[in-house]
Every structure is written in C-alpha cells, then in structure tokens.
Amino acid sequence: MEAKPVKNKFGTAPVFFTAISTILGAILFLRFGYAVGTLGFWGVLLLVILGHTLTIPTALALSELATNKRVEGGGEYFVISRSFGLNIGATIGMALYLSQAISVAFYIIAFTETFEFVFNYFASSLNFNLPRQVISLPAMAVLGLVILRKGANTGVKTLYVVVGILFLALIMFFLGKTEYSTTVSGGLGNLEMRNMKDFFIVFAIVFPAFTGMTAGVGLSGDLRNPGKSIPLGTTAATITGMVVYLFVIYKLAISASPEDMLNNQLIMSKIAIGGAFIIPLGLGASTISSALGSIMVAPRTLQALARDTSFPSMKMNRWLAASRNTDGEPVNASLVTVIIAFVFVALGNVNAVAEIISMFFMVTYGSLCLISFLNHFGSSPSYRPSFKSRWYISLAGFVIALFVMFRINTPYALASIIVMVALYTYINHYHRERHGLESLFANALFQINRNLQVYLQKTGSKKKAKEWRPGVICISKDSFKRAKAFRLLNWISYRYGFGTYLHRIEGYYSRATSQQAAEELSKLIEIYDTTQNHVYVDTIISPSYTSAIVQAIQVPGISGMENNMVIFEYDKEDPDNLGEILENIRLIQAGNFDICLLASARKEMLYRNGIHVWIDFNEPENASLLILLSFIISGHPDWRRSSIKVFGTCKPEQYGETRRELSELVLSGRLPITESNVEIIKLEKGDSVKNLINIRSSTAALVMTGFRPEGLKHNGEAILNGYDDTGTILFVNSHNQKDIM
C-alpha cells in the first residue's frame, strides 16, 4: 500500500522538538529531586552517564541507519523491519507502538500532578479525595481532538509553544535561590554520593527520562529530508537533554536538603523564581509536550505496520493504513491510539505498565544498536551511510541495553522477551513467505566464514589435525528420483561433519544450463528445507560424471576444511549408473579420499531396526572408519530410538584375538555399543560373509560393511551384488586407519 503524498513536509526542527519534549518530561520534574535526595549528586551523575551510554549509541546507530537509505513512514519500525525482515520488524514494531500509545496515557496521568493544589484543596477543605480522572480524561479528550481534527501540523505548532514554556520554567529554576543554597558550598568536592545500594532501584524509577530521544524518528514519513533531519535532530536532542540533566541535578544538590527532596516531589517549585506557578506550568508543559510527541509518533508506527500488512486481516490493514486526503494524516491509526490511551488514562495508574513500556523501549534500542553492529561487521558493499558511528559503540549499546533490562526488573525483562517470542511465532505463522533476517546475518556470517577459512588454511599448513572429521562430497544427477544419498550425507553432517551435495546437470555450461541449474537448485533447497538439514546444496554443470568429480574434489568444502570423503549412490534393484561409478573409483583413490558406496534399496528404512556393522579385522583401516561412521550416523535424530550392532568375522583360531580387538575398539572409542550388541562369528570353511549378512541383517535399517578397491578391479560389480535379502547397504573403504581414541 503506497503512502499518499503530503503537501507540507517538515524540516529538522520537529524531530528535535519532539525528541527534546519527550526527554525533558514528567520524570525530570517529578523524580529527579527524589533521585538526588537518595543518591546524591555524584550518584545521579553516574545514573545519567549510564543512561546515556545506552541512548548515545542508539542515537548514533539510528543516525547511521537513517543516512544509509531513505527512511519512510514508521521511523524506528521502518529501520528495524528493513534490516531484520518484516516479521521480526512487525514483532518489535507492535511492541514499540504499544509503548508509544501507552506512553500517551502515562504523560497525561503525570499531567494531573500540575493540579496538586486542587486535589489538596478538596482533600483538606471538603474532605473529599477528587479522582485524578477528573483532570486526566478531559485533558486526553482535548489532546485526542487536536490530533484527530488538526493532525501533526497543529501538533508541531503546539509543540513549539509548550517547549518554549518548558525552557522558560527551567530558566526560572536555574535562576532561583534558596536559603539552603547560601549555606552550602557549590564546589563539586563538597557534593555527596550516598545509598549506592539503591542505585538500580532509583535507575528504574528515573529510566523513562532516557526513553525519548528516538521519538522524533516517528515523523520520518513527514520529513522533507529524513537522512539529514533524523541524525541532526536526534543527536542534538540527546546531547541537549544530557546537558540539561547535568545542570538540573547540580542545581538540586546545592539548593535543597536531601530530606526536602525526598518529601516533596515538586521540590523544583521551592527553588525556582515564581516556582509555585512556573514549575507546575513547566510540569504541565513537559507532560503535554511528551504526550503530544507520543501521540504524533504512535499512529505513524501503526500505519507503517498496516502498510506492511503486519496484521492477519487485510481489511484491518487497509483501514489502519488509510490517510486523510488533505494532509496525509493517519486518521484511523490516530483514532485507535486515542482509544488505547483513553483506556489506560481511565485506569488511572500505569506504574506497572510503565516498566513494561521501558522494557519494550529497551528492546527497540538494543535492536537498533545490533543492526548497526551487524552492518559494520558484515561489511556489505550496499551499506554506505553518510553518517558513521563505530562498531564497538553500537555493540556496547546492545550489551548495555540487555544488561539494563535485566538489572531494572528481571521478571519484566523475561516477560517482555516471552511476549516478543510469542508474537513473532504468531506473525511468522501467517506470514511464512516473508524472509529478511537471514540477509542481515548472512553478511556477518560471510565475514566470519571468510576469516575462518583463511585461518584454517594457515594453521592447517603448519600442523596436522589431531582428529579425523568427515568432510563429504556427494555428486548425483538422480536427486529428484532418490533421496537416500542426501539423507546419508545429512546424517554424517548433522553434528560431527560437513557435507556438500552437488546436483549434476549434464551438459556444457551455457545460458540454458545455467538457468536450469538455478531452477533445480531452488527446488532442491525447498525440498530439503528442514531444521534437521545440515547439508550445503549446490549444482554442478558438467558434460560427464568424471569431469564433475574432478571439478568437485579439487575445491575445499565451504566450511574451510578439506574434503576427505566421497559418497556414490546407486539403485540396488536397477544399478544403471553403477558401472559409471566404478570407472571413477581409482580417480577418487588418487586423491586419498575415503569412499562410500550406497546401495539404495526401495523398501522403507525402519530406523528402530538399527544399524548393523560388519567388520573384517583383516581390514583395520575399514574397521576404524566403519565404527566411527556408525557412531556419527546414529547421532542424527532419525536414529534416536535405534541401536548399533557390530558383527566381527574371523577364522576359528582367531576368535580370542578378534574378540579382544573388537572389545578394545568399542571401549577405547567410548562408543554407545553394549557388550550384548557385539557378536563374533567364526567362519568355517566354505562360509560366505555375504550369506551371513543376508541372514543376520535382513531386517536392519542400514547395513555397513567394508570393501577393497582391488576386489572391484578384479571382480567388478559382483563384489557389490548378492545382498538381495538386505535393505539399504553402505560399502565403505578408508584411505587410512582412523584414530578413534
């Protein structure tokens, strides 16, 4: 859904004033005195510094992101959704919107403190406790009418007036003197730090004072040049707010005693010139300006969510995305915001909700810092912001956001995360087609993988790997006919190894075969798109099987480790490609690769019937690989209810030695094979191992046994035939003996 053009767009000033009006809000007038009274000047100074170690990185990250691409309507939501993807963006966006909408109610309720003298008069003179809603509900009604009737244009004009009153009140406060100030030295060395055990309790109370610096970003869709106005307005408001905070806490510390600050929440009125009038007026201006800032921003976040069809109902999306024709105002989204605010104003107390709001704001700030960090780390060529922060500043902002969340209120932090996960799960359910998160992390993962490959190559050239780990290649043109080769590769790759599956396109490289490869790769990725798939899938275009193998084995795996094993697969009942496979065995041997020949049976694999491993101790290289592979394969969830059974064959006179060797192999390798699942079979004259396998392993899900390439050379396919009574069978040849200790 396209946004309708707006005739009069804003410059930088509304961004600054919206942000500063939210920063210098109710907390400044109502809670900073309590904070200084509790912690002293130096304690609150540390508090302000901690708050800005989060807000400054966020402001820098937001400024950076805003100058990389055009920021459209929705502000923070737009930035997050275009970086993390629409589903995660919608999750954070909905939480952000609710925080903004409920913040309106929070500020309106705080506005009622301006009329404390009225409530005191009714309580003392008429013995009647006047409900706060007598003031808050009409105030909310007036604010709602202004936004619904006149829109952001009038809201911005009103904002200029109330910000002017706010700064006038602050000036009168700074000019004021008290009797206490004449008795106290203004030197910094005389100021106190106390009660630091209560630091984070006070921080939790004061924290909403630090949540307003991104408020102006919500006007992004109404700005002439968001890439310029957002960085300038946001950064200026953040720095201005910090400077004002520092001066306010210093003025409080030298103008009132700790007892007075703790007992009088409007202590600033006792200090300011004309404080009985000007400070309540300033409080009223600050709360109304903060409410104005929130009520202008929240509907635009909701409208942007609807334009991205974030809600399950298309009718709801169209209705919320609608704009007024004359000025582009999100009237329907504004109406919903006003109703939500009215509900919470009517409740009268949003203190508990205020902490949840703070948590959602923290999630937003942390997300913005994380996006900035990942873009820095990923080094995408498309990431070219004109304003640049530093990756370590963004990372610090993300870490501090998490730390502060859990330090303020751990249950609320956990509740916020649970709510976000549940919301994401629901959104992802009805928007499964959306992607995006992977693109952001892909760049970061690319850098990690690139550096790791170089590191592994360097270290690998200096020292030999201490343990064997499978790096497996499988090349097949029958990917859409049979899946067992891929399944085997996936079993091996699931936990202990790395597998590359190459679907072969027969022919020479051309525009037609290239397009065919791209189409078939997309189909394969879709087919194998499961959480338990750990195989890298690609295509290879080659005129022959031999040339495809030569191409593949010369290139290291994308994991950075050299490939050391090749899987061949054929249909056991119709081995039309077996001859082609056998022709290339010597080629694989030349590269010192381990070889797996998978004879796929058409009957279903019943995993509960387990894996049967047949070992000939006259082939120690194969024995060690068979044991290791069986263990590796059984680690996949497909085999979680199965067991491994090992059969060893020997001449009668070798029984004792074979039993000892096999027991030692299982024991030293710490393999999940019980003594009862190990069986030694004495071969009498005329006995055939092939017949024994057909009899003893006819029901096994997978049979594994060794083979010698020399046997294939002399006897050909006959070595692999004759296993008619078994299911799928895996023939293994090891290049060298593996250490399984």
Image (tube, rainbow, N blue to C red):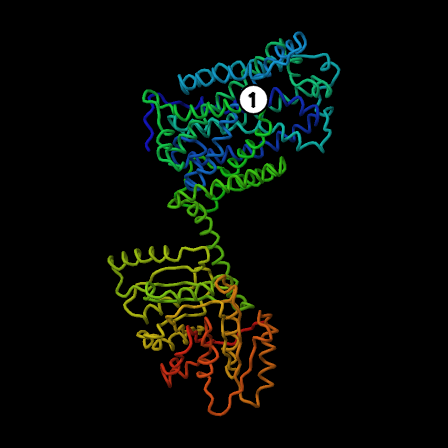
The outermost residue toward the top is: 125
- Coordinates of residue 393 in the picture (x, y in percent): 54, 39
**Image quadrant occupied by the C terminus:** bottom right
**Looking at the picture, which amino acid does disc 1 mark?**
Gly
Residue 316 vs residue 445, the one in the foreground: 316
Badge 1: residue crowd in 10 Å (few <14, some 14–19, many ≥20):
many
Residue 506 vs residue 354, the one in the foreground: 354
- Coordinates of residue 259 in the picture (x, y in percent): 73, 20
**Image quadrant occupied by the N terminus:** top left
Q: Measured along the vertical axis of the image, is residue 345 above or below residue 550? A: above
Q: Provide the secondary structure element on which disc 1 rests.
A: loop
- Coordinates of residue 268 in the picture (x, y in percent): 64, 16
Residue visible at 68% across and 17% down in the picture: 264
How many badges with numbers are in the image? 1
The residue at which mark 1 appears reads as: 25
Residue 187 vs residue 167, the one in the foreground: 167
Left or right position of 566 against 668 = left
Left or right position of 108 against 380 = right
Left or right position of 1 against 48 = left
Q: Is residue 352 visible?
A: yes
Q: Is residue 591 visible?
A: no
For residue 725, which quarter of the picture?
bottom left
The outermost residue toward the bottom is: 685
- Coordinates of residue 285 in the picture (x, y in percent): 54, 16
